[in-house]
């Protein structure tokens, strides 16, 4: 297992509950055992898709995910008891950075749920906050734009953010989590595998 000890300590110092897993399968099993009989919302997350978490939770929870049920599921996901997402970057110092185009994913990590789980693969880790912002803008966002077939400079070249004004731009808001929001429990699952964008 990689040394995730420092980021785990820094996240705990910021007020998060933190669990570390060697594999995505172990983390998925933990979520499956921890969330039962609840309404669950998903943010857009290649990490969660790869882990098969939706299928596991849907067998014994009411799960809402626009990647499965269509755009109308975004609002239902926002009103769920539990919300699951990933982040675009996590600094070793504990800051988490997310970029969004519609806004549901970043909004879901900020308000309205009893509990939020943030699932993070080791490839999202950076040494500093500035590097986390750079990764979110210049690695994660261009890859997502490419996946969506967006006609943006970053999707075509897949090398960096061009701060474009395209109507298909997928990076319209960036949020930094410095700590868990008040009155909403947030648990971070660190996974010692490369997952997501």
Image (cartoon, rainbow, N blue to C red):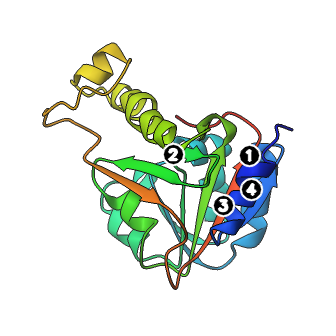
Residue 57 placement: quadrant: bottom right
Image point 57% across, 47% down: which residue? Answer: 90
Question: Residue 124, how many percent across, how many down?
Answer: 59, 39
Rounded to the nearest angstrom, the CA distance separating label 1 from label 2 is: 20 Å
Q: How crowded is mark 3: few (under 14 residues within 10 Å), some or many (20 or more)?
A: many
For residue 188, which numbered disc appears in the image?
3
Question: Residue 112, how many percent across, how many down?
Answer: 42, 79
Q: Residues within 10 Å of mark 4 (few under 14, many from 20)?
A: many
Q: Residues within 10 Å of mark 2 (few under 14, many from 20)?
A: many
Rounded to the nearest angstrom, the CA distance separating label 2 from label 4 is: 15 Å
Image point 31% across, 22% down: which residue? Answer: 155
Rounded to the nearest angstrom, the CA distance separating label 4 from label 1 is: 11 Å
- In the image, taking residue 167 as reference, residue 118 lies left or right, namely right
Rounded to the nearest angstrom, the CA distance separating label 4 from label 3 is: 9 Å
Quadrant, the N terminus: top right
- Give the number of the mark in front: 2 or 4: 2
Q: Name the residue under label 4.
A: 8
Q: Earlier in the sequence, mark 2 or mark 3?
A: 2
Residue 154 placement: quadrant: top left
Q: Earlier in the sequence, mark 2 or mark 4?
A: 4
Q: Viewer-proximal residue, 161 or 52?
A: 161
SS class, disc 3: strand
**Number of callouts in the render?**
4
Is the residue 97 above or below the residue 84 in the image? above
For residue 191, which numbered disc appears in the image?
1
Residue 11 placement: quadrant: bottom right
Q: Earlier in the sequence, mark 4 or mark 3?
A: 4
Most extreme residue toward the right, as rendered?
1
For residue 129, which numbered disc appears in the image?
2
Rounded to the nearest angstrom, the CA distance separating label 2 from label 3 is: 17 Å
């Amino acid at each position: 297992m990689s040394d995730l000890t420092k980021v785990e300590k820094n996240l705990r110092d910021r007020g998060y509950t933190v669990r570390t897993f060697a594999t995505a399968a172990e983390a998925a099993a933990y979520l499956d055992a921890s969330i039962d009989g609840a309404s669950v919302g998903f943010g857009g997350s290649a990490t969660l898709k790869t882990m098969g978490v939706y299928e596991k939770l849907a067998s014994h929870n009411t799960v809402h995910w626009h990647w499965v049920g269509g755009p109308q599921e975004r609002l239902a996901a926002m009103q769920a008891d539990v919300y699951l997402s990933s982040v675009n970057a996590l600094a070793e110092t504990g800051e988490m950075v997310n970029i969004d185009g519609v806004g549901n994913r970043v909004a879901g990590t900020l308000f309205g749920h009893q509990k939020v789980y943030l699932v993070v693969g080791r490839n999202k880790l950076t040494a500093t906050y500035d590097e986390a912002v750079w990764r979110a803008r210049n690695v994660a966002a261009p890859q997502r734009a490419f996946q969506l077939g967006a006609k943006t400079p970053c999707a075509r070249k897949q090398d960096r953010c061009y701060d474009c004004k395209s109507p298909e731009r997928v990076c319209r808001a960036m949020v930094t989590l410095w700590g868990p929001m008040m009155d909403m429990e947030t648990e971070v699952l660190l996974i010692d595998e490369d997952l997501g964008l």
